[in-house]
Image (cartoon, rainbow, N blue to C red):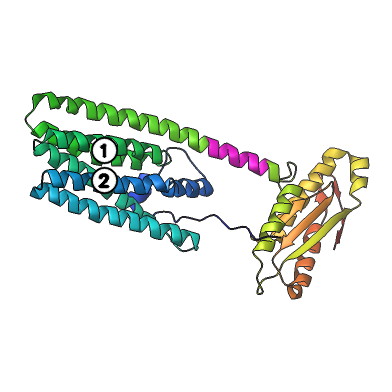
Amino acid sequence: MSRAAAPPAFTAPRWPLSRWLLRVPERISPDIESALIATLYGSMPTFYASIVNSIAIAILIAFRSPTWPILAWLGLSVVVGAMRGGVAWYALRAAAAGRPAPTDWHIVANLAFAASLGFGGFVTVLAVDWVSAAVVWTSIAAVAGGFAFRHVATPRLAVAMLLLSLTPVCAGAVLSGEPITYICLLQLPAFVSTMAVALRYMNGLLVRTMQAERAQAHIAQHDTLTGLLNRTGLDETVVSRWAALTKDTALTVLCIDLDGFKTINDTLGHAAGDAVLRQFADRLRGALRAEDHAARIGGDEFVVVAGIAEEALAALLATLVEALSAPYAISDQVSVEVGVSIG
């Protein structure tokens, strides 16, 4: 069997502000939270293109108007772009290698990038160079759209980046002395609030889609009666456990049959048989470690996949026999016993 490469796992943020910015309205499971965090590192060509674009625009404007504020913006764009690209580059490689990724610093770099764009728009409009301002504003508008597109999974972060990039532009337009630019005071709140509503709605669709996908995947891999793995889930588990084996680890597969189970179905009915199977599955789960797996592959046929060496097998078998051989309660008045064959 071939070894499949595991997808990178990105570290959840630790700083309170970072966690708040990534929090979504829906209540989500840890695996969905991890998947949403991973989207921060998605669309990397677009990510790096935005850095190159912002620096290129700053260079062009600096050639046209080499004033101190414009040159300061150019220097800020280079520093922030290098920090943003460097943090993302390191985070991707750290996650792929199983090391903690600097998600908090990635968020800080994104916020700083948005603020640097806003600063560029602010200083160009105050220079009363409307050609430069038009170029910079067009660039900011394009990148702001990218913020919303790339951060649907984290709407609060998207809104924060929109505010940091657009608010200084509007402030500069108002301070420029051109009365017509006062319209920005109406446009900015309307645009940001509309985008916030749209992002929240799209985020809800995204989360519910991810939840539905995971629910379907769970159904496809688990037995509906007992909740244990089914044949499909067992196959995938064995493949992944086999791929993870090293010379210092072991893998044990046990096949378990219930002796006398058919008699219960024939004499007490299938409802009683189902009750026994559910209790059997609960006991099986309780007797195993968290990292071990149990599956139901037939009517009364079960499989256990455990990462234990041969010398620990006797202790596991004794635990299973003791747990699985005790009487099973069908009702307050009726209980049954079944034998267990393990091989």
For the C terminus, the quadrant is bottom right
C-alpha distance separating marks 1 and 2 = 8 Å
| Viewer-proximal residue among 207 and 263 | 207
Q: Which residue is mark 1?
A: 139
| Viewer-proximal residue among 45 and 178 | 45
| Viewer-proximal residue among 131 and 286 | 131
Q: Which residues are magenta?
A: 209-219
Q: Amino acid at mark 2?
A: Ser
Contact between labelled residues 2 and 1, with CB atoms less than 8 Å apart? yes
Residue 54's disc is 2
Q: Is residue 89 left or right of residue 213?
A: left
Task: Give neighbour class at mark 2: few <14, some 14-19, many 20+ (Cα, 10 Å).
Answer: many
> What is the x, y in percent for residue 210?
54, 39
Q: Is residue 103 left or right of residue 28?
A: left
Query: Is residue 211 shown in magenta?
Result: yes
Among numbered discs 1 and 2, the one appearing first in the sequence: 2
